[in-house]
Amino acid sequence: MIDVKDLVAGYTPGINILNGISLHAEQGEIVTLLGPNGCGKSTLLKTIAGFLLPREGDISMQGKSVGHLPVHRKIRECSMGFVPQTDNVFTQLSIKENLHTGGLFMSPQEKVQRIEALCEQYPILKKKWSDSASSMSGGERQILALARALMPSPSILLLDEPSAGLSPKMLLDVFDAIVKIREQEQVTILMVEQNAIEALKMSDRAYVLAMGQVALEGQAKDLLNDPEIRELYLGGRAA
C-alpha cells in the first residue's frame, strides 16, 4: 500500500513543483497519474520512489513512513520496484544479463527460479535470451524492463510512462502485461501515463494533476465515462 499526505517537493530552492498532494493506492490496485506536461506527474513519482526527498508531507509504504529514505533503500527495505521512462534497460547487455542485474541481492537458486518463471510468463525473453537488449523493439524493451523490476518480487511497482514511444499494438501489449502482473502477483502499481484513455481502461482509480495539485480523483471507469471530464482532461471521446 502507498499513502501520500500533503506532499511538497521541488528541484530548485524556494520553488515547489508539488504543492500539497495527497493520494493512496491499496494493495493490488492499479492507480494512474494523469495530467498535462509540467503538472508534476513524474516529479511526484520520483519523490515517492526516493529520487527526490520531500520538503513537507509524508510518504508511507506498507504502513511505514519512508519519505526520508532514498531510492536504493526503498528498493531493499520497502519491496519497491521502479521502471523509468528512458534508459530502463542496459542495451549493451544480453536479456539474461539484464535479468540478473534485477536479482542482484537474491540467492543464486532464487534468481534461477525467478528467471525461469518470468521467461515462462514472457516468452520473448527466452526467445532472445542471448541477444543484446539493443536488438529488441521498444515494446520488447518495456517487457524486459518490467521483468527486471519484477525479479525480487516487489509488492509495489512504480512505472513512469510505460507507453512512451510505442506503437498502438505494442502499447496494448505492454498494458496487457501490466494487468497480468497485477493479477498474478497482486502488486500495487502506481503509473504515470500520457495515454489517458487506454490507461483508464486498465486502471482501478486515477488522479488528475494540475499545477502540482490534485485536480480530480476517482474510480477510473467513472472518469472515463464522464463526458465533461473526458473533454476537459482526457482529450475528448475515445474510439
Image (tube, rainbow, N blue to C red):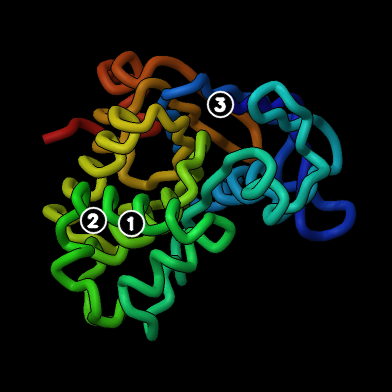
Measured from the top left, where is residue 181 in percent x and y? 32, 37
Which residue is the extreme one toward the front? 109
Measured from the top left, where is residue 174 in percent x and y? 24, 49
**In the image shown, does 40 or 92 lie closer to the viewer?**
92
Helix, strand or loop at disc 2? helix
Answer with left or right where residue 129 lies relative to residue 113.
left
Contact check, label 3 and label 2, Cβ < 8 Å: no
At label 2, which amino acid type do we have? Cys
Q: Identify the residue under disc 2.
A: 119
**In the image shown, does 218 or 37 lie closer to the viewer?**
218
Measured from the top left, where is residue 232 in percent x and y? 38, 30
At label 1, which amino acid type do we have? Ile
Contact check, label 2 and label 1, Cβ < 8 Å: yes
Residue 199 against residue 230 in the figure, above or below: below
Q: Identify the residue under disc 1.
A: 115
At label 3, which amino acid type do we have? Ala
Q: Identify the residue under disc 3.
A: 215
Report the label total: 3
